[in-house]
Image (tube, rainbow, N blue to C red):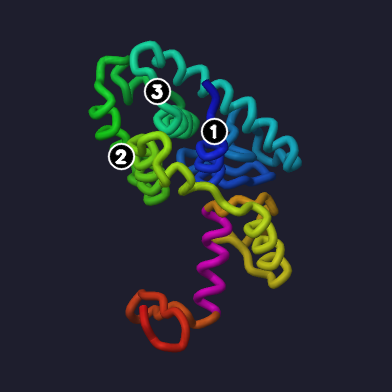
Amino acid sequence: MKISKNGLNLIKEFEGCRLEAYLDPAGVPTIGYGHTSGVQMGQKISMEQAEEYLRRDVERFENHVMRYNSTYRWNQNQFDALVSFAYNIGSIDQLTASGRRTIAEISAKIPEYCHAGGKKLSGLVRRRAAEKELFDTPVGAPADEEHELDQEAVRSLQEALNADGITDADGKALVIDGIKGPDTSAAIRKVLLLSGAFDTRTARFTVGSTGET
């Protein structure tokens, strides 16, 4: 069993892509789409190398999740969600209690894995929520396409943001990868703040000229 494009986009969305090594919230040197094996601070890679690292890493976690397939007979959405989970956490052994938990119990446990370095992180809370939603979605339901994005449109947006000097939350230019991950979302929020569409007093967005929120 292989991860679908839907599942791969979920990983890309939450991992983001950095072409220069950085420390993740747990202090681990990381590069590309969350790749950590053998990474050294100061290391730089190309977009092609980031995609290759992702391909190799995903394959490893696909094999890991498949170890439990004889017990659970994963559907595609469950499999995709758990490969994303394992890609981030490193394993589903604890989540499944080594195959002793039921599907319902696994689903209920997914949101609990939202800490790094002893702290609860909002990014992990959102990721676990997205993984649980995908895990719980029956195959063939409309939500299967929820994480599918028009990559050409996102790529065009990223190019436009860079041209206007709109950076991510860390002040860096966006990677042109067609994935609306956390960095692109941060840049979009900056545009909304600059445009006056966000009212800092009420902490709400105003759309159009009607004042409706």
On whether residue 192 falls in the magenta region, the answer is yes
Mark 2–mark 1 Cα distance, whole angstroms, equals: 22 Å
Answer few, some or many: residues within 10 Å of disc 3's Cα (few below 14, many 20 plus, some between 14 and 19). some
Q: Badge 2 is on which residue?
A: 111
| Dominant SS type (magenta) | helix
Q: Residue furthest front?
A: 140
The residue under label 3 is which amino acid type? Trp
Image quadrant holding the C terminus, namely: bottom left
Residue 76 placement (x, y as % from top left): 45, 29
Sequence-wise, the earlier of marks 2 and 1 is: 1
Sequence-wise, the earlier of marks 1 and 3 is: 1
User: Looking at the image, which residue is at 65% across and 63% down?
Assistant: 157
Residue 75 placement (x, y as % from top left): 41, 26
Residue 11 placement (x, y as % from top left): 52, 39
Local secondary structure at mark 3 = loop
Q: Are marks 2 and 1 in contact (CB under 8 Å)?
A: no
Which label sits on residue 117? none
Image side of residue 155 versus residue 201, left or right = right
Q: Badge 1 is on which residue?
A: 4
Mark yes or no: residue 89 visible: no
Nearer-the-camera pick, 140 or 128: 140
Q: Is residue 95 above or below residue 43?
A: above
The residue under label 2 is which amino acid type? Pro
Mark yes or no: residue 158 visible: yes
Of tags 2 and 3, which is closer to the observer?
Answer: 3
Q: Badge 3 is on which residue?
A: 74
Mark 1–mark 3 Cα distance, whole angstroms, equals: 13 Å
Q: Is residue 157 above or below residue 68?
A: below
Rendering quarter of residue 200: bottom left
Stretch in magenta: 182-194
Local secondary structure at mark 1 = loop
User: Looking at the image, which residue is at 61% across and 54% down?
Assistant: 150
